[in-house]
Image (cartoon, grey):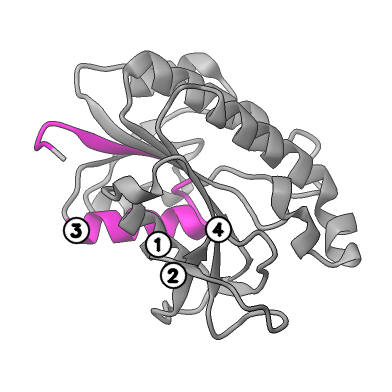
Amino acid sequence: MTSASYIFLAGASRGVGREIANCLTVQQLKVKALLRNESAAAELKASGVELVLGDALNISDVEAAMITDEPIQTVISTIGGLPTDTEKPDYFANKNLIDAAVKAGVQKFILVTSIGTGNSIGALSPQALAALQPVLVEKDKAEQYLITSGLTYTIIRPGGLKSEPATGNGILTEDTRIVGSIHRADVAQLVCHCLNSARTNHKILSAVDKNMLFGQIEFIPFS
């Protein structure tokens, strides 16, 4: 990464996105975050993140934030909704980010979705699938849009998310049968490892904690 380029982060106000912001700033990388409201602004600004207020569901906000004189090395999006949301951002917000990234000449796009999306649907129990189906459909559309966008991409599908500190046991795998839990901070570490890894380009990877798997499946970790 050159000194003039930066990481553009969408979804930094909470959850995995906030953990990724922490991970990136610890590495002293230049980070610009798109925030819909100022609730998380003070803490992010204090850690050195450059903030732009805007809604990812509004393409003009996204383009104004992303298409500037400063080159973007990578866009990372953790934007996602809840099954109860009337307006789910999983597809439309990420579509806007992908379209703007293409216009801005971004080198790489890392999209965080969920186990159960796309060809990992069989990893979920019928109960989990029934609860998450509305969101998973939108996440799948976002994944497919990214894959066909022409951008260099990495898609990371975490398992069930927990908020405790990182364990260091987070792993990635291309095995679509795998399911389990993982701490948000460990997902963030895995995402940050993918930033400069050419081996993760054009890969779809599930993310779990190797000590929190559901069931005993033999699989090959991605390294």
* Residue 136 badge: none
Secondary structure under tag 3 reads: loop
Q: Closest to the observer: 22 or 73? A: 73
Q: Name the residue at 61% across, 62% down.
A: 175
Q: Name the residue at 45% across, 40% down.
A: 202
Whole-angstrom CA distance, mark 2 to mark 1, is 6 Å
Tell me if residue 59 is in the magenta stretch. no
Q: Quadrant of residue 87 in the image?
A: top right
Which residue matches tag 1? 190
* Residue 174 badge: 4
Whole-angstrom CA distance, mark 4 to mark 1, is 14 Å
Q: From this viewpoint, is residue 50 visible? A: yes
Q: From this viewpoint, is residue 56 visible? A: no
Which residue matches tag 3? 27
Q: Which of marks 4 and 1 is nearer the N terminus?
A: 4
- Mark 2 residue type: Asp
Q: Which portion, as a residue range, is magenta? A: 2-27
Label 1 near label 2: C-beta < 8 Å?
yes
Q: Which of marks 3 and 1 is nearer the N terminus?
A: 3
Label 3 near label 4: C-beta < 8 Å?
no
Relative side of 67 to 124, left or right: left
